Amino acid sequence: MYINLTSDTLRIRIEDSDEQHSLSSDIVHKQAGEPALVMHHITRVYTGDEFPIIQSGFAKISGLPEPEAGVNYIVSSEVAHWAATQKRRDVYTPTITNCIKNAHGKLFAVRGLTQFI
């Protein structure tokens, strides 16, 4: 089972089609509540040559449940990256390579999921 913890409904295109409308074979994962987020802490703020520079570090992931047998989570790439550093193997992110965008350039569908290891 996959639970979508991103900020949008996710459409995964199974067929080899670039059509920008729903296909019966598409797998759709609706957003399952509040998205998982990476919480940062600011470690230093100083002035660069032209503008302020803020350094931030990873603090924690918010909204990502503890691992549960048979349950996988779809999250943003930033959350998936940090979850991988914590050895989470139940976390995936939409693969945006070769994705399908609508006429306005907004993501319509992806071709699969990526797992960082």
Image (cartoon, grey):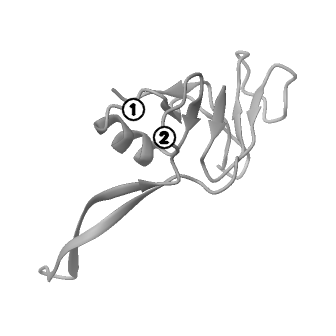
- Label placed on residue 99: none
Front position among marks 1 and 2:
2
Looking at this view, name the residue that lies furthest to the right: 24
According to the picture, the residue beneath numbered tag 2 turns out to be 66
Label 1, residues with CA under 10 Å away: few <14, some 14-19, many ≥20: some
Kind of residue indicated by mark 2: Glu
* Disc 1 from disc 2: Cα separation: 9 Å
Determine crowd level at label 2: few under 14, some 14-19, many 20+ residues with C-alpha closer than 10 A: few
Q: Would you say 40 lies left or right of 107 here? A: left
Choose the circle earlier in sequence order: 1 or 2: 2
Residue at x 73% of width, y 47% of height? 103
Residue under pointer 1: 88
Query: Which quadrant of the view contains residue 70?
Result: top right
- The residue positioned 29% from the left and 38% from the top of the image is 85
Residue 44 occupies quadrant: bottom left
Kind of residue at disc 1: Arg
Q: Residue at x 38, y 40 (%)?
A: 83
Q: In the image, is 112 to the left or to the right of 25? A: left
Quadrant containing the C terminus is top left
In terms of secondary structure, where does tag 2 sit? loop
Residue 53, horizontal then vertical, whole percent: 20, 75
